[in-house]
Amino acid sequence: MGGFFGTERVPFDLFGPVHLATIGVVVVVGLCVVRAGLAADERGRRRLRVAMGLTILFFLVSRHVWKAATGLWAAENDIPLHLCNIMGWVTLYGLWTRHPAVLRLMYFFGVAGAAQALLTPNTEFGVVHTTFFESMGSHGTVVIAGVWAAMVEGYRPTSRDPWIALGLLNLYAVVVYPVNLLLGSNYLYVIEKPLGPTILDFFPGWPWYILFLEPVAIGLFLALRLPFRNRAAD
């Protein structure tokens, strides 16, 4: 069964026209949302937060509905334990509460993690499919919300925050590893590399690619701290 809602596996056209155009749309929408937030009063910002939250919720729910309807939903793949899946729900909570600790997660994990997923989405049904647009839409909105946390909500990462983020990421990996062994899953990709093209393809096999990801992760987190290095109170 093919088509937009079909189940036929189609090779993903990485950085093809549709993929690049979708990334471009996410960037333009993100710039517009952040600029609108900076110019708006609190009532306007509340509306934008609600809009982002509803967008994330729609994409999160739609994927589960489609997978359940097609009989493809499985605990080893679809429990929201991947970092970006969790960040979707965390971002919803952060947009609602604006708690500083949650804004930190939105900024570091939302921007660094979801941006990588935008560049190399894990999709097995091609670009002209509901799962591709769900992936790009949910990850894109999480990235936008992470930038919003810093640019609009006023979160300012301190020099400690990248290391806190790294510690939390490693702690989560330790927690999710036995879950993977129990379910036969590969959440957070700590059991093996994902099937689709990702940055992990440049690293050696398990478990060495996990070690190589440590400097990559801290490099990304430190880079996210750089724009605010002179403006955050440590």
Image (cartoon, rainbow, N blue to C red):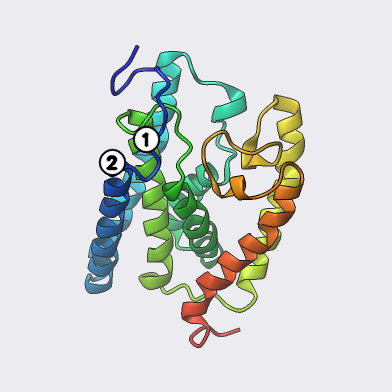
Relative to the observer, which residue lies in front, 41 or 84?
84
**Which residue is depicted at the point 54% across and 65% down?**
104
At label 2, the amino acid type is Val
Quadrant (top left/top right/bottom left/bottom right) for the C terminus:
bottom right
Amino acid type of the residue tagged 1 in the rendering: Phe
- Contact (Cβ within 8 Å) of mark 2 with mark 1: yes
Q: Position of residue 18 (x, y in %)?
A: 28, 41
Q: Which residue is mark 1?
A: 132
Q: Is residue 165 visible?
A: no
Badge 1 element: helix
Residue at position x 62%, y 60% in the image: 217
According to the picture, the residue beneath numbered tag 2 turns out to be 18
Residue 176: x and y, percent? 70, 40
Q: Nearer the viewer, mark 2 or mark 1?
A: 2
Give how far across and how far down residue 53 sits, in percent: 36, 49
Which residue reaches farthest bottom?
Answer: 230
| Residue located 66% across and 66% down the image | 164
Along the horizontal axis of the image, is 226 left or right of 168?
A: left
Alpha carbons under labels 2 and 1: distance apart:
10 Å
Establish if 171 lies above or below 176. Answer: below
- State the residue in front, 77 or 6: 6
Instruction: Say what secondary structure mark 2 lies in.
Output: helix
Q: Does the image show residue 9? A: yes
